[in-house]
Image: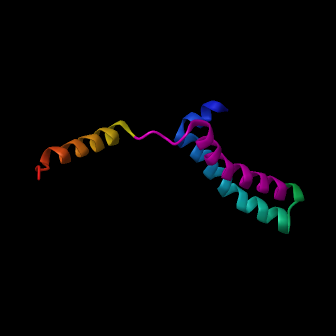
Amino acid sequence: MFALFKNRLAYLSVSLILLVCATPLISLGTTTGPSQLWWLGLAALFFGGLIPPVQRLLLGPPSPAPEAAETSSNASSDQGANDEPR
């Protein structure tokens, strides 16, 4: 389970699937289906919304891609080289 939180695409996909499945389950459980569908939909909504914040609390924000970090450091060093002293 903890390995799921290390892959950002995996845990965001699971969260999205749970959130998308929650709406029809809640709707069916409320109108025509058994009440267990309502509870299952409510649990899917709860856990689907809880996964991203829990991941941020456990592992912190995602690290930037290596290319993005390199590009931003080059841009900041280039700006300093082009500045003329006043």
Answer with left or right where residue 24 lies relative to residue 83: right
Residue positioned most to the bottom: 31
In the image, residue 16 lies in the stretch drawn in magenta:
no
Q: Position of residue 25 (x, y in %)?
A: 76, 59
Residue that appears at 61% across and 30% down: 3
Relative height, residue 44 to residue 64 (above, below): below
Residue positioned most to the top: 3
Colouring scheme applied when the structure was drawn: rainbow
Answer with left or right where residue 6 lies relative to residue 44: left
23 or 68: nearer the viewer: 68
Residue that appears at 52% across and 42% down: 61
Answer with left or right where residue 5 lies relative to residue 28: left
What span is colored magenta in the figure? 37-64
Q: State the predominant SS element of the stretch in magenta.
A: helix
Q: Position of residue 77 (x, y in %)?
A: 22, 42
78 or 26: nearer the viewer: 78
